[in-house]
Amino acid sequence: MTKFSFKLKHTCAQTGARVGEFSTPHGAIETPVFMPVGTQATVKGLSVEEVDKTGAQILLSNTYHLYMRPGQEIVKNAGGLHKFMNWNKPILTDSGGFQVFSLAKLNKITDDGVTFNSHIDGSSHHFTPESATQIQSDLGADIFMAFDECSEYGATHEYAEKAVKRTLAWLERCKKAHTNKNQILFPIVQGNMFDDLREFSIKETIPYAECGIAVGGLSVGEPKDEMFKMLDVLKPHYPKNMPHYLMGVGSPDCIVEAIMRGIDMFDCVLPTRMARFGAAMTSKGRLTIRNAEFKNDHTPVDEKCDCYACKSYSKSYIRHLLNVDEILGARLLSIHNIHYLINLTKRVKTAILNNSLRDFYVEFRNSEEYNN
């Protein structure tokens, strides 16, 4: 896969955390990196120009939702997601597996695939590793995810083991179905909260990883300490010559904790979802801007932030927008929250390059930011 490569640029002497450069057909990505989520070919409420100005290097879109609406053929006929949504940087698409298991009404899971009913109109659909791969090929993202089974938190060891083995069998089928040389497949490590299954899964998954490997099935309702434990289990086994992607994680504490444990890539809807509920991630911790305490606060959301929202508007004004249901309020907080997380990864990157990430971590762990 000559169009994709990963260059390890620096390893922190204190922690082993990495700074790297992941090259794709639509540009290079500096890691560690946070990827804003554009579920339905848009980061909710924002234009791609606004997202670009937050410093975003790559976006994630959702296969399940785009399959449902508008359909992958429409996106393909538009020239692929990049042209359809006017984003000329890298794009990653997930396989739709998580949404099939969590959002749609499941009818049946078999070794062949998953039969489910649409959350939109109840119509029946069937996803297989081959169809999920084809849909993502039609969407035209740079990175596409293997179709996997994400066992729910609290599953028994017996069921989690069955899901791991099914995920591996499906991975083999995704690999065979993958013919688009402008894309690269990221296989997914599963195993729920069981050490032995996580170790088995990553060892069996690595041979399929050409230039990237993902960790799934975390941040699905388990206590954060259990997530960190699983990342500790996996850390010694990651291949060094490719990025390591932790799926669905985007809180500041988890991002820093995970980078300490060998993770390079993150995505999450959290920053925009928080924004729609009137909450901001800041250097002083989470602020609920809707609250009355900000009615006459004419300072920026975060005085340490240089995003468009903080340079241009006050807490008082954004609170007003939120409380009269003007969409601009949520849009401004979305810009701020995405910028905050991207800037956090930049601060971590600087600490790695200075071989001082553990010092950064200790200070961050004891700050208000940790509990954003």
Image (spheres, rainbow, N blue to C red):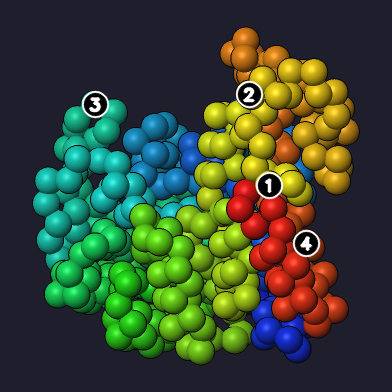
Q: What separation in Å lies between label 4 and label 1 (alpha carbons)?
A: 18 Å
Q: Amino acid at mark 4?
A: Lys
Q: Give the numbered dot on residue 346.
A: 4
Q: Earlier in the sequence, mark 4 or mark 2?
A: 2
Q: What separation in Å lies between label 3 and label 2 (alpha carbons)?
A: 35 Å
Q: Nearer the viewer, residue 336 or 176?
A: 336
**Quadrant containing the N terminus in the rendered view:** bottom right
Residue 187 falls in which quadrant of the image? bottom left
Q: Secondary structure at mark 3?
A: loop
Q: Amino acid at mark 1?
A: Gly
Q: Nearer the viewer, residue 372 or 335?
A: 372
Q: What separation in Å lies between label 3 and label 1 (alpha carbons)?
A: 40 Å
Residue 287 falls in which quadrant of the image? top right
Q: Earlier in the sequence, mark 4 or mark 3?
A: 3
Q: Give the numbered dot on residue 290.
A: 2
Residue wearing tag 3:
121
Residue 3 appears in the figure:
no
Residue drawn 69% across and 53% down? Answer: 368
Q: Secondary structure at mark 4?
A: helix
Q: Which residue occupies the extreme top position in the image?
A: 324
- Mark 4, mark 1: which one is toward the viewer? 1
